[in-house]
Image: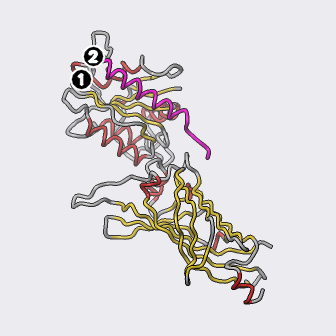
Amino acid sequence: MRILALSGSLRRDSYNTQLLRAAVELVPAGAVLELYDGLAVLPPYDADIAPAPAAVVDLRARLAAADAVLIATPEYNGSIPGQLKNALDWASRPFPDSALRNKPIALTGASTGSYGAMWAQADLRRVLGVVGARVVGEELPVAKADEQFGAAGQLVDPELRARLVAHLALLVAEAQRTPIAA
Amino acid sequence: MSVAEQTQQLIPAGTWKSDAVHSSVGFAVKHMVVATFRGEFTEFEATLAGGEEPKLTGVVKAGSVRVQDENLTGHLASPDFFDVERYPELRFESSSIRRDGDALVAPAELTVKGVTMQVEVRGTIAGPVTDPYGGERIGLTLETTIDRTEFGLDWNAPLAGGGFAVGNDVTLTAELELVLEQ
């Protein structure tokens, strides 16, 4: 069971990337969570570029090879960052049979405010639905992200940690029941 | 078959199978509150058992859903709507068929996206007639209205002026030309 984890933030000390690093230790037994770090090298989406750039081919291959995907998004001006949308636009082609089609995907989002990127997660859910992905579970907002991580990068709040564990378990369970033939 | 025999039985005995070329299965739903939007399923099979206890069964391939726009067709097939990978078939099975005045009434079980609900289908029957090749044909028009959200097809988008992009009530229609199996 391979989970590809995408952080929507490019910032070196991104809380969303930290959240995904913390998730590495929290996946169910038998599952492996791999962080994708190619977001910054994807060119702006352009349907005229053919064949697809190597970075795009790499992203699509990693998505195709993954059984499930976990996306952690920050919230920029009330929505998902442009570079995350750009990655999803590349990954969604060819439509409808892209590497995202029917892919179980769980969402989370960290912000230093009180809402934990809820609007961004809602927008991300809508985008992934149109793309044809299988969004699993509810939003998982991580508010006050600057207070959530210990010195070793671990989640300090046991309740949040438990919620992330449950979130990942739900994602893996969904991936295990996909596809079903009848 | 004499006229007297036909009046005794709503549908003459035998197994009647849908003629794929001359039959259609579709749906209609309110779009943007003001208009009616239609789509169809291009692959289906209906079987009508005639005789004392007539019964109609139908299987529709969910992945054959078609609308004019291929992006929308792709979205309709995705987990947001029919989720055709997980639920490849829609099923219809009447428990009986009776006449109510000029109308045909068939209480039935309808299964969409893995959810089975009781529905009442109303319509008309014409025939049988003898076709140029010596076969016997019956025409059925059937219609029922369901609440799509009861079957888990609950995608929507709010409109700025109030209301939602897609109505919840969906009218399902079948126009069937059925041929008596020899």
Q: Which image quadrant for residue B97?
A: bottom right
Which chain is home to disc 2?
A: A
Image: A126 above or below A11: below
Residue type at mark 2?
Answer: Phe
The residue at 28%/55% (across/down) is B158
In percent of the image, x 23 and y 60: which residue is there?
B162
Q: Secondary structure at mark 1?
A: helix
Residue B152 vs residue A66, the one in the foreground = B152
Assess whether mark 2 and mark 1 are in contact (beta carbons under 8 angstroms). Answer: yes
* Colour mode of the rendering: secondary structure
Amino acid type at circle 1 is: Ala
| Label 1 crowd bin: few (<14), some (14–19), many (20+), radius 10 Å | many
Q: Quadrant of residue A163?
A: top left
> What is the number of the mark on residue A149?
2
Which residue carries the number 1 mark? A145
User: Residue at 40% of width from left, 29% of height from top?
Assistant: A167
Instruction: Indicate yes or no whether the magenta region holds residue B22.
Output: no
Q: Which residue is at the far bottom?
A: B3
Q: Magenta region: which residues?
A: A157-182
Q: From the top left corner, tell me how far across and down residue A21 is, in percent.
A: 37, 19
Disc on res. B7:
none
- Spatial CA distance of label 1 from label 2 is 7 Å
Query: Is B67 or B85 nearer to us in this picture?
Result: B85
User: Residue B131: image x %, image y %?
Assistant: 73, 83
Which secondary structure lies at badge 2? loop
Q: Residues within 10 Å of mark 2 (few under 14, many from 20)?
A: some
Output the chain of dot 1.
A
Q: Is residue B91 above or below residue B130?
A: above
- Would you say the magenta stretch is mainly helix, strand or loop? helix
Q: Is residue A148 left or right of residue B26?
A: left
Q: Residue furthest right?
A: B182
Q: Is residue A96 left or right of residue B20?
A: left
